[in-house]
Image (tube, helix red, strand yellow):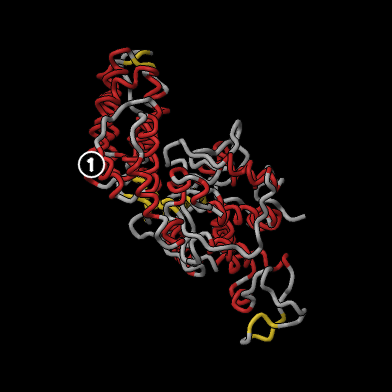
Amino acid sequence: MPKLAYPDLYNPDYVFKALLAHGMFSDKLPPCFTSEQFYTQVQTDSIASPENPARHSYVEYQATRNTNVPRQLAIPHPESYLHLCTHIRNYWKEINQHIGKPKAKFNFCHVRKMKDKKRIFAMNYSGADKWEREELSLDYSLGCRYVVLADISNCFPSIYSHSIPWAVKGKGWSKIHQCCSWNKRKSLGDPCSRNHCEPCPNDKSDLWPNDIDAIACSTKDGETNGIFIGPHTSNIISEIILTQIDIGLQTNGFKKVIRFIDDYTFYAENESDARKFLRTLTLKLKEFELILNAKKTKIIPYQKYTYDHWISRLNQFSFSGGNKHGFTSINAFIDYALELSEETKNYAVLNYAIKIISGKQLSYRARRLYIKKILQIALDRPYILPLLEKYVFSFVNKGVVEFLDKFLPYLLGRSVENATTDALAYAFYFAIKYSVNLNLSEDDYKNVLELNDCVSMLLAYKHCEQQDTSVDIFIGKAMGLLKLSKREQDKFWLFLYEVIPKNHMMIF
């Protein structure tokens, strides 16, 4: 029997529920969105997914990356996302077997069953893989003189949907057989196109990658370039392609590879092997119209790699003050993390430092001053906002309102001024979560609406509702959106669904 890539995910219905109910919204969004009710509605009302999918556009969400520049995430339209999840469920056995084809596992960030979680993917969750990856990195280090660090340039947005069948059936087959299971030639033996005489396979077991390709296109209004960043379906679709590249590397003798989605680490015995690996990887990526990120791809001596790694350097920091730390020690650590992030040009350093401090015991004064310092940093580095609730506000529990009363007006003002809409969304989310009255005027709300950002508009509307103030300005905005084309309405479906009475609109 063919090997499964994810033996713990053998049940297609379990995968379907995890994707539809818990994998629609990125964890970079404010954690107030869920599709659980949608999944329940689908199950209760027996909403069927038609074979031939309707095309929809999607909600865009600009999330600030740890490089302090935005990355576009997507919230798919529920109808097209339902179709995609349904087809992944229908073909889960074939997908699981295809991704399991490499002889050795390279990728350690993938879908899996997660302890005490309903979702099947989290960027920073590795489970038991953490120990396997740690042991492999030590095994691969034996005799290693050089380390290759490589990154696929703009990976998910660069994935060409037609490369899904290329990865499964081969490019030659895919160029001939371009039909899907719902528009295949009805008569067995008919060719798939006028230019080719080879008979259409007329079998879903052959056409499933074409089906996934077509459904993926429909979630982006028919666009073939790029898959979504955010929804967990993309972490499955990408592996259909990337594991085929893994096979190509293994076939060429490269086995000491650890991959983290689109980031590669190769342990080379000499510089010649390192360069051969980069050449082979470049050629294999080219087969699927992908390229390496030149700025992030480098060959470095192994000793420099182990010494310079910022995680090791952060973990070596010596905190003073015994078991309970004062602000002087905590402040010095944050300053060191900021310096290290500038030195390495990797702003994930600060994220990691915040998580380290969350596990420390701080004095009463240190807790208060630490929160003030982090909030000040967050104004300039909004990429840390998703960490605040779990890793920073927990130091004061119910006392967080005192800090937010002063912080949120500044965050909201800068967000509108700089059009950092993810920071704006978090400003309203925190205001709603902790019942902070922002005392905004109608002109303030107009400034928010002028940014035309679906998520921040929705959360601003919810804040108005909570404060029992007029929402007429939001209803007017929504009614104006309903005059636009269906494609443009899809870009605001989440806002429209909440604001407009249900008898005025239909998601399906």
When the figure is inspected, residue 186 is found, relative to residue 308, above or below; the finding is below
Q: Is residue 197 visible?
A: yes
Q: Quadrant of residue 297?
A: bottom left
Residue at the image position 53 percent from the left and 65 percent from the top: 161
The quarter of the image holding the C terminus is: bottom right
- Residue nearest the observer in this picture, 271 or 7: 7
Residue 123, position as x, y percentages in the image? 49, 42
- Residue nearest the observer in this picture, 15 or 411: 411
- Could you tell me which secondary element the residue under label 1 belongs to? helix
When the figure is inspected, residue 428 is found, relative to residue 158, above or below; the finding is above
Is 343 left, or right, of 352 in this rendering?
Answer: left
The quarter of the image holding the N terminus is: bottom right
Amino acid type at image mark 1? Asp
Q: Is residue 315 visible?
A: no
- Residue nearest the observer in this picture, 500 or 106: 500
Q: Quadrant of residue 189?
A: bottom right
Residue at the image position 25 percent from the left and 19 percent from the top: 328
Residue underneath mark 1: 443
Badge count: 1
Residue 340, position as x, y percentages in the image? 28, 37
Is 320 left, or right, of 292 in this rendering?
Answer: left
Residue 30, position as x, y percentages in the image? 42, 38
- How packed mark 1 is, by other alpha carbons closer than 10 Å (few <14, some 14-19, many 20 or more), is few
